Every structure is written in structure tokens, then in C-alpha cells.
Amino acid sequence: MDAALERMLNLLLESERAGVAVLDALAAEVKHPDLKLLLLDAREEESRNAGALERLVREGGGTPSAATGPFAGKVAAVGTMRGRLTLLIRGQEWVARKIEETLALAPESGPIHDYLQKMANRHRHEIEWVRAELIRLMDTIG
């Protein structure tokens, strides 16, 4: 596996782990059942992504990172739920950009390319879905 591709896959892996931590913490705080479900569903997707990325790095001959990215701490430092959720969306947008960058480094076909393409599509959808749901639920969020 190319060293640059391995670094980017590990960056995504660390970011997905951080996403799991953020979504766990947010879901534990929110009271609104629709928002809680949205956060828990997103958490499961992030967890699946982390597992898949770890497997792809290993199967590609690389070494999966054991680290978790710093995003969870950044979100926790924001004082309001609304602010934390807004930062969550910005974080998802950042990850979507990094997926695209990683996709450009991946072989044009094969398991890494295929997974990253699916992951990119899911992230784009998730960003729009979460943004729409947050707009709908903003009055119920503190």
C-alpha cells in the first residue's frame, strides 16, 4: 500500500472513531427522541466505517492506527447543544472532503476504491439529512 494512501486511510479511521465518541456523547445528552435516533443511527454508521477502514488498511498491507482523532474534544468544548451539533455538521463536511482526497489516491478499482466511493456517497447524504433534520428540530434543541 502506498504510504500516502495509508496515512489518509488512517486519518479517516481516526476521524470515524472520534465521530463515534462525539455521537455517543451527544446522544446521551439529547432528550428529543427523533434527534437521539438520528444521532445513534449516525453513530452506527461511523462505527461500521471505522471497522471497514481498519480492515482495508490491514488487508492492503498497512498498519491501522490505534488513535482517535481530536474532534471529540473540540465538540465537547462547545458550550451549547446547538453549537455542538453545528460543529458536528462541519466535521462531517471535513470528513467528506478527506474521503474525496483519499479516493483520489486509491487504485482506480478494488476494495479500497469501492468502499471509499460508498463512504463518500453516504457521507454526502448524511450531511444533507442531518442538516435538514437539525433545521426541523432546532426549536427543540437548547
Image (spheres, helix red, strand yellow):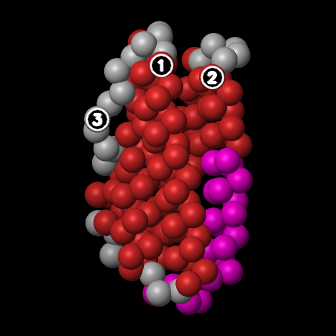
- Membership of 110 in magenta stretch: no
Residue 121: x and y in percent read 71, 43
With 94 as the anchor, is 64 left or right in this view? Answer: left
Image marks 2 and 1: residues in contact by CB distance under 8 Å? yes
Question: Contact (CB < 8 A) between labels 3 and 1?
Answer: no
Q: Amino acid under label 1?
A: Glu
Q: CA distance from mark 2 to mark 1?
A: 10 Å
| Apparent side of residue 64 relative to residue 112 in the rendered image (left or right) | left
Q: Is residue 90 visible?
A: no
Q: Nearer the viewer, residue 63 or 83?
A: 63
User: Disc number at residue 59?
Assistant: 1
Q: Is residue 83 left or right of residue 104?
A: left
- What is the chief secondary structure element of the magenta stretch? helix
Label 3: how many residues lie within 10 Å, few (<14), some (14-19) or many (20+)? few
Q: Which residues are magenta?
A: 122-142
User: In the image, what residue occupies the spot 47% across and 19% down?
Assistant: 59
> Which numbered disc, 2 or 1, marks the residue that appears first in the sequence?
1
Looking at the image, which residue is at 49% across and 33% down?
53
